[in-house]
Image (cartoon, rainbow, N blue to C red):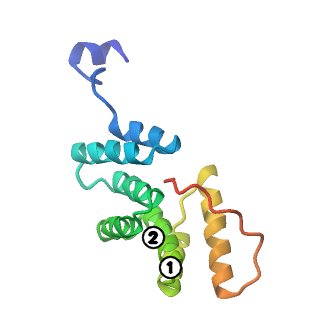
Amino acid sequence: MTIWNKLFGGDDPGRVDYYREGVDLLSDRKYHEALTSFRLALKESPGDAVVLQQIAICYTRIGMTDEAAKTYKHVLQKDPTASGAHYGLAFILLKDGEVEEGAEHLEAFLAQPPDGPDAEKHVRHARGTLAELRGEAHESNPEPPPNELF
């Protein structure tokens, strides 16, 4: 923390970063605790699409896939280009046998894929799954990557 922040009240050292806490808990597989932290982060930033997507991931991990799907759909209503929401919703739909709608969300994800080293495994997985659904030849489809945001 800089002296400037100390003097003028920036970056309150006693303030909890609920989003970061949620991400850490999620990576430790403490899904219920992460969900609580993300809900607190959402109170600080109502409607934040990134926080909502993390909440959906928690719902998915604890088996509340209907709630996860609703949350992803809510994100997509606010931002139809939210790639993480397309990705997460696609695999929920596919698991529920909604192949056509799931494929549409994979296509939307791949139309504007995230970039970066962590995102590449998700892009490969989406491409492989879509090719498999279409009956196309494809490179080996890796195990599904952790459902994390990019």
Identify residue for label 2. 89
| Residue in view at x 64 percent, y 72 percent | 127
State the image quarter where residue 68 is shown.
bottom left
> x and y percent of residue 98 in the render?
48, 84
What is the x, y in percent for residue 66? Answer: 37, 70
Residue 28 position in % (x across, y down): 52, 40
For the residues bearing labels 2 and 1, Cβ distance under 8 angstroms: yes
- Asked if one can make out residue 116 in the rendered structure from this viewpoint, the answer is no
Give the amino acid at mark 1.
Answer: Gly
Residue 75 in sight here: yes
**Amino acid carrying mark 2 in the image:** Leu
97 over 19 or under it: above or below: below
Q: What residue is shown at x 54% (from left), y 81% (from top)?
A: 103
First of labels 2, 1 by sequence position:
2
- Could you tell me which secondary element the residue under label 1 belongs to? helix
Name the spot of residue 13 as percent of width and height, x first.
31, 20
In the picture provided, is 104 more to the left or to the right than 141?
left
74 is higher (above) or lower (below) than 15: below
Of residues 57 and 45, which is closer to you in this image?
A: 57
Mark 1 sits on what residue? Answer: 102
Asked which quadrant contains residue 9, the reply is top left
Which one is in front, 84 or 133? 133
Position above or below: 81 against 23: below
